[in-house]
Image (cartoon, rainbow, N blue to C red):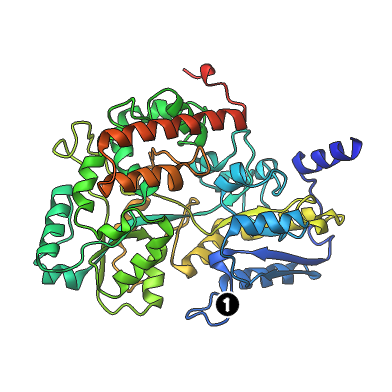
Amino acid sequence: MKALLALTLLLTAAPALAAPGSWKGTITMYVQDYTPDVAGAKRPLKAFQQIADEYAKKYPGIKVTFSKTPVPDNDTMVRVKAAAGELFDVYWAQAASLNSTLPKGVAVDLAPVLKQPNPYIPGNKAWQDALNKRVLAETAAPSGAVYALSGDVVAFTLFYNQTLFKKAGVTKAPATWTELLDASKKLKAAGLGVMTAVPAYPWWSRHFQSDLYSKDYARISAFDGQPGFSALDEAIAINKGILSPKDDRFMSWWPTFKQFTDYWDKDYLTLAPEKNYDAFQTFVGSKEALIYEGSYKAREMQDAGVAFPVGAFNFPRLSKKESKYATGIDTANVTGGTGSFQFAVSTPLSNKTMKEAGKQEAVLDWMKFFGTPANLQRVVGENGSYVPTWPGTTPKFSKQFDSAALSAQIGLPERSIGVGDSAPNLGWGDMQKIFGLYLSGNVSFDQAKVQVQQTLDRASADYARKNKVDYSKYK
């Protein structure tokens, strides 16, 4: 019992500050898309290795090494390595997984550390002051713990093949929903593919719901007392019948969206989301004119040798013509999520080497070193796939592509509302399945509403049980 108590205190207490360099050894790190010097890469990255070399020069005796082994399923990798006590010292993981699906005790709570000064940021009094406050609040666990240092996001947009648009007589990028449907009709009439994709519910739903519920955003996002829309806010809104078919706004946009997907390849509507990789290959091969994807696809298109000119336009604003509930706000940036600059520190429970005296403090010091706005800019800018979120940083996309639509999202306040984060399989699993069945004509709108309500009820109950939430306390 005493040993368990000691381990609990070790995992939750703020790590003591030690003189940098007092521990000597190797720090292991997995940095996902920012991995430097990957063999065979068309454009090998250098930034993270350069930063590591700078740290090693400052503190001789400490070396940072980067894992270059591909990880097909990150959550599985974390579970397996943690169970063996062999997790990387610093590793990529999304906050949503660390907060819910991954075992407790695999990552250090960074919240106490973020309240301390970062000596590598001039004039800094608390490291968290240099981060994005909204992102920090949205990625925190219900308990207030922060398990991941988050520094970038994926920006989503509609990429289009300008050559195919021209062949179909579409002279400009659609700016309204009506223009989007008109462009789709012209492409279809010209015998050209419109879209081949799995209609990802977690992505598209946020555009519509963030508009239809925008007047209630202040209330919905304030249930947990923190800025931004969190998983707790979502669970409470579901329980209260706000984000559910009990509110007419929640699914009113489904028939509107079906007007668009009726032009798509029907074979993909009910498939699993991972099939969108095949859809990307179809776009690269000029067999479809549109693809809705994240900013990371700009780099992938360049690496794939795309020869045709690629344009991009953001989700069009909705009008009363599309929905009587439309408020007309710009929701271009509400779909997206955390990128590859999302790093956690392993614990002595998940990484046996963390039991070495002084190692955890050294690892946290290394995280402070690379976790500055200047270094974030270096790492994210070199990759050209994501958008840095910390104050003072700016996006840098490939010059080969029209990035105006992506850049236009950066200055927008994010007032994103959606359903999917409050339960592990809610958005990409259960809701995705019902959404696809409706769009493909396999279930009616009324049948879909019944299935969605049942799904949300289960998710709400599961969230309350797992996180010990009493919904009656929230008004």
In this rendering, position of residue 377 left or right of residue 371: left
Q: Residue at x 37, y 26 (%)?
A: 242
The x, y position of residue 208, in whole percent, is 29, 41
Q: Residue furthest right?
A: 2
Q: Is residue 89 above or below residue 39?
A: above
Note whether residue 397 is visible.
no
Q: Residue at x 60, y 51 (%)?
A: 149
Q: Is residue 306 above or below residue 254?
A: below
Judge by depth and name the residue closer to the eye, 148 or 470: 470
The x, y position of residue 316, in whole percent, is 22, 49
Q: Residue at x 59, y 58 (%)?
A: 74
Q: Secondary structure at mark 1?
A: loop
Residue hosting label 1? 38
The x, y position of residue 265, in whole percent, is 25, 60
In this rendering, position of residue 46 left or right of residue 360: left
Q: Is residue 406 above or below residue 146?
A: below
